[in-house]
Structures are given as structure tokens and as C-alpha cells.
Image (spheres, rainbow, N blue to C red):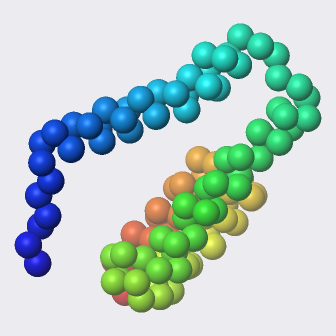
């Protein structure tokens, strides 16, 4: 399949627009709200953003990994469960160590 080549002017126009859009999104939080105290109810909800986003990023990599062309891989599921248990029981750093350690060990052994 031949790649589609767009004109340089279109590329730079889109790149500059995306840069401006990204700046405005960040400025809306940092520039406008950066010096103000946020309400307690909002701070309570913001505490759960990372907990909500991380599983959404990890789940596709565990259930449909690109490394196996989208085929289910029990090794990755086992490593994810080991990381989940270690994170629940010991903390974040141990979750990383247990998850990656399990993945590497199982890949080496199997």
C-alpha cells in the first residue's frame, strides 16, 4: 500500500492548530485554575482519576496484546493478576516488580 503524502502547508497548518489546541486545554487548568483553591468535592473526585484511567490503559494490553497479534495470552493475564495482587497487598512499586517479574519469568520458562 502506498503511503498518502500530504502537502507541507497542510501538515504545518494541522500541526500548529493541534499545538494551539493542546496549549489551550492545558492552560484552561493550569493558567485559569492554578492559583485557586478547588472545592473539596472536586478534589475528592480528582483522587480517583488515576485509578480510573490506569485500568483503561492496561486492559487492552492484557486481553488483546499487540505482541501476539491480538490473540489472548495467558502469560500476560497471569502477570497482570500478579501485579494486581502485589499492588493491593504491598503497594505500587511492588506491583511493578511482581508484574514485570512474572511476565519475564513466564516468558523465559515457557
Compared with residue 21, is residue 69 higher up or lower down, i.e. above or below?
below
Q: Residue at x 36, y 35 (%)?
A: 17
Q: Residue at x 41, y 29 (%)?
A: 20
Name the side, left or right, on which 28 lies relative to 33. Answer: left
Q: Which sits in the foreground, 26 or 15?
A: 15
Q: Which sits in the foreground, 18 or 31?
A: 18
Residue 35 position within the rendered picture, expressed as x and y whole percent measured from the top left:
71, 11
Residue 57 position within the rendered picture, expressed as x and y whole percent measured from the top left:
55, 61
Q: Which sits in the foreground, 5 or 68?
A: 5
Please identify the quadrant where the N terminus is shown.
Answer: bottom left
Judged from this view, the residue extending furthest toward the left is 2
Residue 44 position within the rendered picture, expressed as x and y whole percent measured from the top left:
86, 38
Residue 74 position within the rendered picture, expressed as x and y whole percent measured from the top left:
50, 86
Compared with residue 25, is residue 110 higher up or lower down, i.e. above or below?
below
- Total number of numbered labels? 0
Q: Residue at x 12, y 48 (%)?
A: 7
Quarter of the image for residue 19 reads top left
Q: Residue at x 61, y 16 (%)?
A: 31
Compared with residue 37, is residue 47 higher up or lower down, i.e. above or below?
below
Q: Is residue 98 visible?
A: no
Judged from this view, the residue extending furthest toward the top is 35
Please identify the quadrant where the C terminus is shown.
Answer: bottom left
Compared with residue 15, is residue 76 higher up or lower down, i.e. above or below?
below
Q: Is residue 64 visible?
A: yes
Name the side, left or right, on which 64 lies relative to 42. Answer: left
Amino acid at each position: 500500500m502506498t503511503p498518502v503524502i500530504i502537502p507541507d502547508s497542510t501538515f504545518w497548518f494541522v500541526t500548529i492548530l493541534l499545538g494551539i489546541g493542546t496549549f489551550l486545554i492545558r492552560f484552561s487548568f493550569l493558567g485559569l485554575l492554578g492559583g485557586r483553591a478547588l472545592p473539596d468535592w472536586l478534589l475528592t473526585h480528582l483522587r480517583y482519576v488515576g485509578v480510573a484511567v490506569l485500568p483503561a490503559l492496561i486492559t487492552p494490553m492484557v486481553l488483546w496484546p499487540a505482541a501476539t497479534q491480538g490473540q489472548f495470552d495467558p502469560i500476560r493475564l497471569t502477570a497482570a493478576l500478579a501485579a494486581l495482587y502485589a499492588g493491593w497487598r504491598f503497594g505500587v512499586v511492588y506491583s511493578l516488580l511482581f508484574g514485570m517479574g512474572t511476565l519475564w519469568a513466564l516468558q523465559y520458562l515457557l
